[in-house]
Image (cartoon, rainbow, N blue to C red):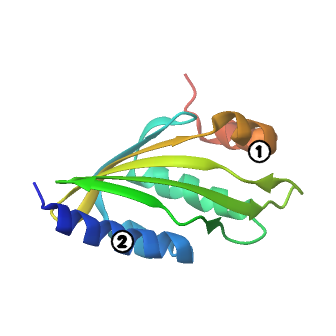
């Protein structure tokens, strides 16, 4: 398990890359066995997370502006509370609120949980997300 200082350092670099919209840089800090969870997607792996993030970026007129985060760290876990604002190509405003939990080991993020306002997501991006899900859900 890493120290709180190591965890903060990895997270600070990840946060900087997120704010810059640097997906490749962000995912350099993510372990190959990474998994993430959110209310709308459940658990997915690194590749699926990257694919969804790239799709989501196509919906934005410009990259997110994030509020200054509130961060709490202990050992290999770090929590971030923040909000984002972005104009969407569909004319809506994306203004979501988040609580992220990251678990960091060996200088890499191994797990993420993203708690957000899923009602807001559905209200401003419903049709776009339904299309994405239809195209990316295995036939069963």
Q: Residue furthest left?
A: 1
Left or right of residue 25, residue 40 in this image? right
Q: Which of the two discs, 1 and 2, sits closer to the camera?
A: 2
27 or 47: nearer the viewer: 27
Residue name at image x 63 percent, y 39 percent: 117
Decide if residue 24 is in sight here: no
Residue 109, percent from left and from top: 29, 58
The residue carrying mark 1 is 125
| Label 2 element class | helix
Work out whether 136 lies above or below 78: above
Q: Is residue 59 above or below residue 61?
A: above
Whole-percent x, y for residue 102 in the image = 33, 51
Residue at the image position 73 percent from the left and 72 percent from the top: 62
Residue 52, position as x, y percentages in the image: 57, 52
Q: Tag 2 or tag 1, which sits nearer the N-term?
A: 2
Asked if the residues shown at circle 1 and circle 2 are in contact, with their CB atoms under 8 angstroms apart, the answer is no
Q: Classify mark 1: helix, strand or loop.
A: helix
Residue 6: where, in percent of width, then height? 18, 68
The answer to whether residue 41 is visible is yes
Q: Specify whether 32 is left or right of 6.
A: right
Q: Which of the 4 image quarters holds residue 9?
A: bottom left
Instruction: Out of 75 and 55, give the one closest to the viewer.
Output: 75
Q: Quadrant of the N terminus?
A: bottom left
Q: Quadrant for the C terminus, please.
A: top right
Q: Is residue 46 left or right of residue 108?
A: right
Residue for badge 2: 12
Count of numbered badges drawn on the protein: 2
């Amino acid at each position: 398990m890493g120290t709180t200082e190591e965890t903060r350092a990895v997270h600070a670099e990840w946060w900087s890359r997120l704010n810059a919209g640097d997906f490749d840089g962000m995912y350099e800090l993510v372990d190959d066995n990474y998994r993430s969870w959110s209310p709308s997607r459940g658990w997915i792996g690194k590749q699926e997370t990257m694919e969804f993030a790239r799709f989501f970026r196509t919906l934005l007129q410009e990259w997110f502006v994030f509020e200054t985060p509130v961060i709490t760290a202990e050992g290999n876990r770090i929590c971030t509370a923040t909000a984002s604002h972005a104009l969407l190509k569909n004319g809506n405003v994306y203004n979501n609120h988040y609580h992220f939990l990251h678990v960091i080991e060996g200088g890499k993020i191994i797990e993420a949980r993203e708690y957000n306002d899923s009602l807001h997501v559905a209200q401003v991006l419903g049709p776009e997300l339904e299309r994405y899900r239809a195209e990316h859900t295995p036939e069963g």
